[in-house]
Amino acid sequence: MRIVTIIFTVLISIASVFADESDYTANIGKTPPMGWNSWNKFHRGISADIIREIADGAAKYKLNEAGYKYLVIDDAWQASGLGPNEELVADPNKFPDGIAPLVKYVRDRGFELGIYACPNKLTCAGFPGSLGHEKLHAKQFGDWGCMFLKYDFCPTRSGEIGLAYDEVVRRFRAMGDALHDQDPRIVYAICEKGHAGKINRRTRKHAGITTPVTLEERLKAFSWCADVGGVMWRTTGDISANWDRIMSIVDEQEGLACLSGPGAFNDPDMLEVGNGNLTEAENRAHFTLWCMLSAPLILGNDLREIPKDVLEIITNEELIALDQDLMCKQAKKVLDQGDIEYFVKPLADGDFAVCVLNRSGQSQDVVIDWSKLGLDKDAYTVRDPWARKDLGVVKKQLLCTIGSHDVFVVRLGEAK
Ligand code: GLA
Protein backbone atom coordinates (compact mmCIF):
# COMPACT_ATOMS: atom_id res chain seq x y z
CA MET A 1 0.00 0.00 0.00
CA ARG A 2 2.84 2.37 0.93
CA ILE A 3 4.67 1.62 -2.31
CA VAL A 4 1.53 2.44 -4.26
CA THR A 5 1.22 5.76 -2.40
CA ILE A 6 4.87 6.61 -3.07
CA ILE A 7 4.58 5.80 -6.80
CA PHE A 8 1.38 7.85 -6.97
CA THR A 9 3.07 10.82 -5.24
CA VAL A 10 6.07 10.63 -7.59
CA LEU A 11 3.76 10.56 -10.61
CA ILE A 12 1.82 13.58 -9.32
CA SER A 13 5.05 15.54 -8.79
CA ILE A 14 6.30 14.65 -12.29
CA ALA A 15 2.94 15.74 -13.71
CA SER A 16 3.08 19.05 -11.87
CA VAL A 17 6.64 19.72 -13.07
CA PHE A 18 5.42 19.26 -16.65
CA ALA A 19 2.32 21.35 -15.97
CA ASP A 20 4.60 24.12 -14.77
CA GLU A 21 6.80 23.83 -17.88
CA SER A 22 3.98 24.13 -20.37
CA ASP A 23 1.62 26.50 -18.60
CA TYR A 24 3.21 29.93 -18.58
CA THR A 25 0.39 31.53 -16.70
CA ALA A 26 0.03 28.94 -13.93
CA ASN A 27 1.07 31.26 -11.14
CA ILE A 28 0.87 34.82 -12.36
CA GLY A 29 -1.83 37.40 -12.71
CA LYS A 30 -4.62 35.01 -11.82
CA THR A 31 -6.95 37.96 -11.42
CA PRO A 32 -6.64 40.93 -13.81
CA PRO A 33 -3.37 42.88 -13.30
CA MET A 34 -3.80 46.29 -11.67
CA GLY A 35 -1.48 49.27 -11.92
CA TRP A 36 -0.72 52.49 -13.74
CA ASN A 37 0.87 53.32 -17.11
CA SER A 38 2.49 56.59 -18.19
CA TRP A 39 1.13 56.86 -21.75
CA ASN A 40 -2.42 58.21 -21.42
CA LYS A 41 -1.37 61.21 -19.33
CA PHE A 42 2.26 61.89 -20.22
CA HIS A 43 2.82 60.37 -23.68
CA ARG A 44 6.48 60.99 -24.55
CA GLY A 45 6.99 63.48 -21.71
CA ILE A 46 8.25 61.03 -19.11
CA SER A 47 11.38 61.06 -16.95
CA ALA A 48 12.82 59.47 -13.83
CA ASP A 49 11.61 62.50 -11.86
CA ILE A 50 8.04 61.98 -13.03
CA ILE A 51 8.12 58.24 -12.29
CA ARG A 52 9.41 58.94 -8.78
CA GLU A 53 6.67 61.56 -8.23
CA ILE A 54 4.07 59.11 -9.53
CA ALA A 55 5.34 56.44 -7.11
CA ASP A 56 5.16 58.99 -4.27
CA GLY A 57 1.58 59.87 -5.27
CA ALA A 58 0.57 56.21 -5.57
CA ALA A 59 1.96 55.62 -2.06
CA LYS A 60 0.37 58.80 -0.66
CA TYR A 61 -3.07 57.70 -1.88
CA LYS A 62 -2.38 54.09 -0.71
CA LEU A 63 -3.20 52.71 -4.14
CA ASN A 64 -1.35 49.49 -3.30
CA GLU A 65 -3.88 48.84 -0.55
CA ALA A 66 -6.65 49.14 -3.16
CA GLY A 67 -4.84 46.46 -5.24
CA TYR A 68 -2.79 48.52 -7.71
CA LYS A 69 0.66 46.99 -8.12
CA TYR A 70 2.55 47.80 -11.34
CA LEU A 71 3.76 51.28 -12.32
CA VAL A 72 4.58 50.95 -16.00
CA ILE A 73 6.86 53.22 -18.03
CA ASP A 74 5.46 53.26 -21.58
CA ASP A 75 7.18 54.27 -24.84
CA ALA A 76 9.83 57.02 -25.15
CA TRP A 77 12.00 55.96 -22.20
CA GLN A 78 14.73 54.78 -24.60
CA ALA A 79 17.69 56.55 -26.17
CA SER A 80 17.44 56.98 -29.94
CA GLY A 81 19.74 54.04 -30.74
CA LEU A 82 20.69 50.65 -29.32
CA GLY A 83 23.95 50.39 -27.34
CA PRO A 84 27.22 48.86 -28.65
CA ASN A 85 26.03 45.31 -27.90
CA GLU A 86 22.53 45.90 -29.34
CA GLU A 87 21.17 46.42 -25.84
CA LEU A 88 18.42 48.90 -25.02
CA VAL A 89 19.66 52.11 -23.43
CA ALA A 90 17.59 54.51 -21.35
CA ASP A 91 17.53 58.12 -22.57
CA PRO A 92 20.40 59.70 -20.55
CA ASN A 93 18.57 63.03 -20.27
CA LYS A 94 15.28 61.61 -19.04
CA PHE A 95 16.66 58.66 -17.03
CA PRO A 96 20.26 59.62 -16.15
CA ASP A 97 20.72 56.71 -13.72
CA GLY A 98 19.01 54.13 -15.90
CA ILE A 99 16.04 52.00 -14.91
CA ALA A 100 17.31 49.77 -12.06
CA PRO A 101 17.31 52.51 -9.35
CA LEU A 102 13.68 53.28 -10.23
CA VAL A 103 12.76 49.65 -9.60
CA LYS A 104 14.08 50.03 -6.06
CA TYR A 105 12.40 53.43 -5.59
CA VAL A 106 9.05 52.08 -6.68
CA ARG A 107 9.43 48.83 -4.69
CA ASP A 108 10.29 50.75 -1.51
CA ARG A 109 6.87 52.42 -1.85
CA GLY A 110 4.97 49.16 -2.27
CA PHE A 111 4.82 48.83 -6.07
CA GLU A 112 6.65 47.05 -8.93
CA LEU A 113 8.07 48.73 -12.01
CA GLY A 114 6.98 47.77 -15.52
CA ILE A 115 8.49 48.69 -18.87
CA TYR A 116 7.65 48.90 -22.58
CA ALA A 117 9.22 47.36 -25.69
CA CYS A 118 8.26 46.41 -29.22
CA PRO A 119 8.61 43.38 -31.57
CA ASN A 120 9.53 45.56 -34.56
CA LYS A 121 12.60 47.52 -35.58
CA LEU A 122 11.07 50.69 -34.14
CA THR A 123 8.54 51.34 -31.39
CA CYS A 124 5.34 53.28 -32.05
CA ALA A 125 7.11 56.51 -30.99
CA GLY A 126 10.13 55.68 -33.20
CA PHE A 127 12.60 54.34 -30.62
CA PRO A 128 14.60 51.10 -31.05
CA GLY A 129 12.58 47.88 -30.92
CA SER A 130 13.53 44.41 -29.67
CA LEU A 131 13.16 42.40 -32.89
CA GLY A 132 15.99 39.84 -33.03
CA HIS A 133 17.22 40.83 -29.55
CA GLU A 134 14.46 39.28 -27.48
CA LYS A 135 16.72 37.24 -25.15
CA LEU A 136 19.13 40.10 -24.51
CA HIS A 137 16.39 42.65 -23.87
CA ALA A 138 14.38 40.27 -21.67
CA LYS A 139 17.56 39.71 -19.65
CA GLN A 140 17.99 43.47 -19.25
CA PHE A 141 14.39 43.85 -18.01
CA GLY A 142 14.84 40.92 -15.63
CA ASP A 143 18.23 42.13 -14.36
CA TRP A 144 16.79 45.59 -13.69
CA GLY A 145 13.95 43.96 -11.74
CA CYS A 146 11.03 44.95 -13.98
CA MET A 147 8.00 42.76 -13.24
CA PHE A 148 5.76 43.75 -16.16
CA LEU A 149 6.41 44.14 -19.87
CA LYS A 150 4.05 45.81 -22.34
CA TYR A 151 5.11 44.47 -25.75
CA ASP A 152 3.58 46.68 -28.42
CA PHE A 153 3.37 45.76 -32.12
CA CYS A 154 4.04 48.81 -34.30
CA PRO A 155 3.94 47.89 -37.99
CA THR A 156 3.51 51.41 -39.37
CA ARG A 157 6.80 52.86 -38.17
CA SER A 158 8.75 49.85 -39.37
CA GLY A 159 7.01 49.49 -42.75
CA GLU A 160 5.61 46.11 -41.69
CA ILE A 161 1.91 46.63 -42.11
CA GLY A 162 0.45 43.40 -43.51
CA LEU A 163 3.04 41.08 -41.91
CA ALA A 164 1.92 37.42 -41.97
CA TYR A 165 -0.10 36.11 -39.03
CA ASP A 166 2.44 33.36 -38.22
CA GLU A 167 5.33 35.80 -38.21
CA VAL A 168 3.56 38.14 -35.77
CA VAL A 169 2.78 35.21 -33.46
CA ARG A 170 6.39 33.98 -33.76
CA ARG A 171 7.69 37.38 -32.65
CA PHE A 172 5.41 37.49 -29.61
CA ARG A 173 6.32 33.90 -28.72
CA ALA A 174 10.03 34.77 -28.91
CA MET A 175 9.60 37.45 -26.22
CA GLY A 176 7.17 35.25 -24.22
CA ASP A 177 9.78 32.46 -24.11
CA ALA A 178 12.60 34.87 -23.28
CA LEU A 179 10.65 36.46 -20.42
CA HIS A 180 9.57 33.09 -19.10
CA ASP A 181 13.21 31.90 -19.03
CA GLN A 182 14.20 35.14 -17.34
CA ASP A 183 11.54 35.15 -14.63
CA PRO A 184 8.14 33.51 -15.07
CA ARG A 185 6.60 35.98 -12.63
CA ILE A 186 7.00 38.87 -15.10
CA VAL A 187 3.55 39.84 -16.39
CA TYR A 188 3.58 39.68 -20.19
CA ALA A 189 1.15 42.27 -21.56
CA ILE A 190 0.63 41.74 -25.28
CA CYS A 191 -0.38 44.81 -27.27
CA GLU A 192 -0.89 43.58 -30.82
CA LYS A 193 -4.29 45.15 -31.46
CA GLY A 194 -5.48 42.62 -34.03
CA HIS A 195 -2.92 43.33 -36.77
CA ALA A 196 -2.04 39.68 -37.46
CA GLY A 197 -5.68 38.65 -37.63
CA LYS A 198 -6.36 41.60 -39.96
CA ILE A 199 -9.08 43.02 -37.78
CA ASN A 200 -7.16 46.20 -37.00
CA ARG A 201 -8.63 49.14 -38.87
CA ARG A 202 -5.30 50.18 -40.44
CA THR A 203 -4.24 46.66 -41.42
CA ARG A 204 -7.65 46.00 -42.92
CA LYS A 205 -7.56 49.17 -44.99
CA HIS A 206 -4.03 48.36 -46.16
CA ALA A 207 -5.17 44.88 -47.25
CA GLY A 208 -8.16 46.43 -49.08
CA ILE A 209 -10.67 44.51 -46.95
CA THR A 210 -13.96 46.39 -46.86
CA THR A 211 -16.27 43.85 -45.22
CA PRO A 212 -17.12 44.29 -41.52
CA VAL A 213 -15.12 42.21 -39.04
CA THR A 214 -16.89 38.99 -38.07
CA LEU A 215 -16.85 37.49 -34.56
CA GLU A 216 -14.97 34.47 -35.92
CA GLU A 217 -12.21 36.76 -37.22
CA ARG A 218 -12.03 38.62 -33.91
CA LEU A 219 -11.73 35.39 -31.94
CA LYS A 220 -8.99 34.10 -34.25
CA ALA A 221 -7.13 37.40 -33.95
CA PHE A 222 -6.56 36.91 -30.20
CA SER A 223 -6.69 33.11 -29.93
CA TRP A 224 -2.87 32.77 -29.76
CA CYS A 225 -2.15 35.36 -27.05
CA ALA A 226 -2.51 33.18 -23.92
CA ASP A 227 -0.61 30.39 -25.65
CA VAL A 228 2.53 32.51 -26.09
CA GLY A 229 2.49 33.53 -22.41
CA GLY A 230 0.25 36.62 -22.52
CA VAL A 231 -1.45 37.42 -19.22
CA MET A 232 -3.39 40.19 -20.98
CA TRP A 233 -3.75 41.32 -24.57
CA ARG A 234 -5.07 44.51 -26.13
CA THR A 235 -8.22 43.88 -28.11
CA THR A 236 -8.52 47.36 -29.60
CA GLY A 237 -6.63 50.32 -30.99
CA ASP A 238 -5.88 53.21 -28.63
CA ILE A 239 -8.37 54.55 -26.14
CA SER A 240 -8.85 58.31 -25.65
CA ALA A 241 -10.54 60.34 -22.91
CA ASN A 242 -13.73 60.57 -24.91
CA TRP A 243 -17.15 59.01 -24.21
CA ASP A 244 -17.79 57.83 -27.79
CA ARG A 245 -14.41 56.12 -27.99
CA ILE A 246 -14.97 54.41 -24.63
CA MET A 247 -18.35 53.17 -25.87
CA SER A 248 -16.92 51.86 -29.15
CA ILE A 249 -14.28 49.94 -27.16
CA VAL A 250 -17.01 48.39 -25.00
CA ASP A 251 -18.78 47.30 -28.20
CA GLU A 252 -15.59 45.69 -29.47
CA GLN A 253 -15.46 43.38 -26.43
CA GLU A 254 -18.70 41.64 -27.34
CA GLY A 255 -18.23 37.94 -28.01
CA LEU A 256 -14.67 37.80 -26.66
CA ALA A 257 -15.58 36.57 -23.14
CA CYS A 258 -14.68 32.98 -24.04
CA LEU A 259 -10.98 33.94 -24.47
CA SER A 260 -10.70 35.37 -20.98
CA GLY A 261 -10.31 33.48 -17.69
CA PRO A 262 -7.99 33.19 -14.69
CA GLY A 263 -4.50 34.38 -15.66
CA ALA A 264 -5.52 35.41 -19.20
CA PHE A 265 -7.44 38.60 -19.95
CA ASN A 266 -8.84 40.58 -22.83
CA ASP A 267 -7.49 44.11 -22.40
CA PRO A 268 -9.77 46.93 -23.62
CA ASP A 269 -6.84 49.36 -23.00
CA MET A 270 -5.73 51.49 -20.09
CA LEU A 271 -8.17 53.60 -18.10
CA GLU A 272 -8.85 57.25 -18.87
CA VAL A 273 -10.66 57.83 -15.55
CA GLY A 274 -9.64 61.33 -14.42
CA ASN A 275 -8.32 62.40 -17.82
CA GLY A 276 -9.59 64.96 -20.32
CA ASN A 277 -13.11 66.28 -19.90
CA LEU A 278 -14.83 63.08 -18.85
CA THR A 279 -17.63 63.89 -16.40
CA GLU A 280 -17.92 62.19 -13.02
CA ALA A 281 -20.70 59.97 -14.41
CA GLU A 282 -18.58 59.04 -17.44
CA ASN A 283 -15.59 58.24 -15.22
CA ARG A 284 -17.81 56.04 -13.04
CA ALA A 285 -19.37 54.27 -16.04
CA HIS A 286 -15.94 53.70 -17.67
CA PHE A 287 -14.48 52.23 -14.46
CA THR A 288 -17.56 50.08 -13.82
CA LEU A 289 -17.57 48.62 -17.31
CA TRP A 290 -13.89 47.69 -17.06
CA CYS A 291 -14.61 45.96 -13.71
CA MET A 292 -17.57 44.12 -15.25
CA LEU A 293 -15.35 42.97 -18.12
CA SER A 294 -12.69 41.60 -15.73
CA ALA A 295 -10.33 43.92 -17.56
CA PRO A 296 -6.84 44.78 -16.31
CA LEU A 297 -7.24 47.97 -14.26
CA ILE A 298 -4.31 50.05 -15.47
CA LEU A 299 -4.83 53.67 -14.41
CA GLY A 300 -3.82 56.39 -16.86
CA ASN A 301 -4.31 59.55 -14.81
CA ASP A 302 -1.86 61.79 -12.95
CA LEU A 303 -1.30 60.13 -9.58
CA ARG A 304 0.58 63.09 -8.10
CA GLU A 305 -2.66 64.90 -7.22
CA ILE A 306 -5.90 62.97 -7.54
CA PRO A 307 -9.22 64.85 -7.22
CA LYS A 308 -11.51 63.40 -4.52
CA ASP A 309 -14.22 62.20 -6.94
CA VAL A 310 -11.65 60.39 -9.09
CA LEU A 311 -9.96 58.80 -6.05
CA GLU A 312 -13.31 57.54 -4.79
CA ILE A 313 -13.99 55.90 -8.13
CA ILE A 314 -10.62 54.18 -8.60
CA THR A 315 -10.49 52.91 -5.01
CA ASN A 316 -14.08 51.68 -4.57
CA GLU A 317 -13.33 48.28 -3.04
CA GLU A 318 -16.72 46.79 -3.93
CA LEU A 319 -16.25 47.58 -7.62
CA ILE A 320 -12.64 46.36 -7.55
CA ALA A 321 -13.90 43.13 -5.94
CA LEU A 322 -16.09 42.56 -9.02
CA ASP A 323 -13.07 43.02 -11.29
CA GLN A 324 -10.85 40.83 -9.12
CA ASP A 325 -13.43 38.09 -8.60
CA LEU A 326 -11.62 34.75 -8.62
CA MET A 327 -13.80 33.22 -11.31
CA CYS A 328 -12.55 35.98 -13.68
CA LYS A 329 -15.67 35.87 -15.86
CA GLN A 330 -15.96 38.67 -18.38
CA ALA A 331 -19.47 40.15 -18.27
CA LYS A 332 -21.73 39.54 -21.24
CA LYS A 333 -24.24 41.96 -22.66
CA VAL A 334 -27.53 40.08 -22.15
CA LEU A 335 -30.04 42.71 -23.25
CA ASP A 336 -29.78 45.64 -25.62
CA GLN A 337 -32.59 48.21 -25.69
CA GLY A 338 -30.78 50.76 -27.81
CA ASP A 339 -29.47 53.40 -25.44
CA ILE A 340 -29.95 51.13 -22.43
CA GLU A 341 -27.77 48.04 -22.23
CA TYR A 342 -27.62 45.32 -19.55
CA PHE A 343 -24.48 43.38 -18.62
CA VAL A 344 -24.30 40.36 -16.30
CA LYS A 345 -21.17 38.97 -14.65
CA PRO A 346 -21.38 35.70 -12.66
CA LEU A 347 -19.24 35.74 -9.51
CA ALA A 348 -17.33 33.01 -7.68
CA ASP A 349 -19.62 32.93 -4.63
CA GLY A 350 -22.74 32.41 -6.74
CA ASP A 351 -23.70 36.11 -6.78
CA PHE A 352 -24.22 38.09 -10.00
CA ALA A 353 -23.16 41.62 -10.83
CA VAL A 354 -25.66 43.45 -13.04
CA CYS A 355 -24.72 46.71 -14.73
CA VAL A 356 -27.20 48.85 -16.64
CA LEU A 357 -25.58 51.40 -18.96
CA ASN A 358 -27.35 54.54 -20.12
CA ARG A 359 -25.61 55.65 -23.34
CA SER A 360 -28.11 58.41 -24.05
CA GLY A 361 -27.84 62.15 -23.43
CA GLN A 362 -30.79 62.15 -20.96
CA SER A 363 -31.48 60.44 -17.68
CA GLN A 364 -33.71 57.38 -18.06
CA ASP A 365 -36.16 55.49 -15.85
CA VAL A 366 -35.39 51.81 -16.15
CA VAL A 367 -37.09 48.62 -14.99
CA ILE A 368 -34.59 45.83 -14.36
CA ASP A 369 -36.48 42.59 -14.74
CA TRP A 370 -34.54 39.57 -13.43
CA SER A 371 -36.16 37.14 -15.87
CA LYS A 372 -35.23 39.26 -18.92
CA LEU A 373 -31.58 39.06 -17.89
CA GLY A 374 -31.58 35.26 -17.83
CA LEU A 375 -31.56 35.18 -14.02
CA ASP A 376 -33.70 32.28 -12.87
CA LYS A 377 -34.66 33.22 -9.31
CA ASP A 378 -37.78 35.14 -8.41
CA ALA A 379 -36.07 37.20 -5.69
CA TYR A 380 -32.52 38.33 -4.90
CA THR A 381 -30.80 40.27 -2.14
CA VAL A 382 -29.58 43.51 -3.73
CA ARG A 383 -26.52 45.57 -2.89
CA ASP A 384 -25.63 48.88 -4.57
CA PRO A 385 -21.80 49.02 -4.53
CA TRP A 386 -21.52 52.70 -5.57
CA ALA A 387 -23.96 53.85 -2.87
CA ARG A 388 -22.53 51.16 -0.53
CA LYS A 389 -26.12 50.35 0.40
CA ASP A 390 -28.15 47.16 0.85
CA LEU A 391 -31.48 47.47 -0.92
CA GLY A 392 -32.98 44.37 0.74
CA VAL A 393 -34.70 41.45 -1.00
CA VAL A 394 -36.16 42.47 -4.34
CA LYS A 395 -38.74 40.36 -6.17
CA LYS A 396 -38.93 40.19 -9.97
CA GLN A 397 -38.11 43.82 -10.83
CA LEU A 398 -36.10 46.78 -9.64
CA LEU A 399 -36.88 50.34 -10.74
CA CYS A 400 -34.13 52.91 -11.02
CA THR A 401 -33.27 56.21 -12.66
CA ILE A 402 -29.92 56.36 -14.45
CA GLY A 403 -28.31 59.66 -15.39
CA SER A 404 -26.95 60.38 -18.85
CA HIS A 405 -23.71 58.48 -19.65
CA ASP A 406 -23.92 56.73 -16.29
CA VAL A 407 -24.44 53.22 -14.96
CA PHE A 408 -26.48 51.55 -12.27
CA VAL A 409 -24.80 48.50 -10.76
CA VAL A 410 -26.12 45.94 -8.33
CA ARG A 411 -24.71 42.82 -6.75
CA LEU A 412 -27.39 40.14 -6.52
CA GLY A 413 -27.22 37.37 -3.95
CA GLU A 414 -29.33 34.41 -3.02
CA ALA A 415 -32.44 35.41 -1.03
CA LYS A 416 -32.81 32.88 1.80
C1 GLA B 1 0.67 52.48 -29.26
C2 GLA B 1 -0.03 51.81 -28.08
C3 GLA B 1 -0.24 52.84 -26.98
C4 GLA B 1 1.10 53.41 -26.54
C5 GLA B 1 1.82 54.01 -27.76
C6 GLA B 1 3.25 54.40 -27.44
O1 GLA B 1 -0.12 53.43 -29.88
O2 GLA B 1 -1.24 51.25 -28.49
O3 GLA B 1 -0.90 52.25 -25.88
O4 GLA B 1 1.87 52.39 -25.96
O5 GLA B 1 1.89 53.08 -28.84
O6 GLA B 1 3.95 54.85 -28.55
Image (tube, rainbow, N blue to C red):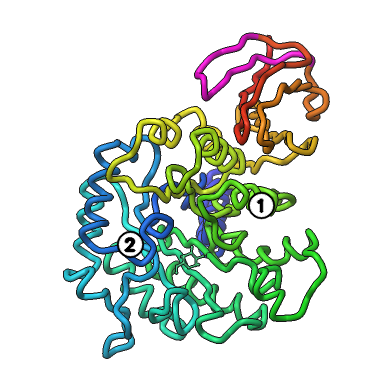
Residue 324 image point, x, y percent: 51, 38
Give the magenta-colored segment's residue range: 378-392
Please indicate whether residue 181 sits to the left or right of residue 402 in the image.
left
Q: Amino acid at mark 1?
A: Ser
Q: State the residue position of label 2.
A: 146
Please tell me which residue lies in front, 116 or 400: 400
**For the view shown, which residue lies furthest in the front direction?**
361
Residue placed most toward the observer, 186 or 275: 275
Q: Tell me, for residue 358, which label it has, or none.
A: none
How far across and how far down the image is residue 173, in percent? 54, 73
**Relative to the observer, which residue lies in front, 222 or 310?**
310
Residue indicated by mark 1: 248
Query: Compared with residue 351, is residue 357 higher up or lower down, i.e. above or below?
Result: below
Q: Is residue 345 visible?
A: no
Chief SS of the magenta region: strand
Residue under the point 37% across and 52% down:
70
The quarter of the rendered structure image containing the N terminus is top right
User: Is residue 210 found inside the magenta-colored segment of the image?
Assistant: no
Q: Could you tell me residue 146's position as x and y percent?
A: 33, 62
For marks 1 and 2, give the CA distance: 33 Å
Image-based side of 172 in relation to 81, left or right = right
Element type where label 2 sits in the image: loop
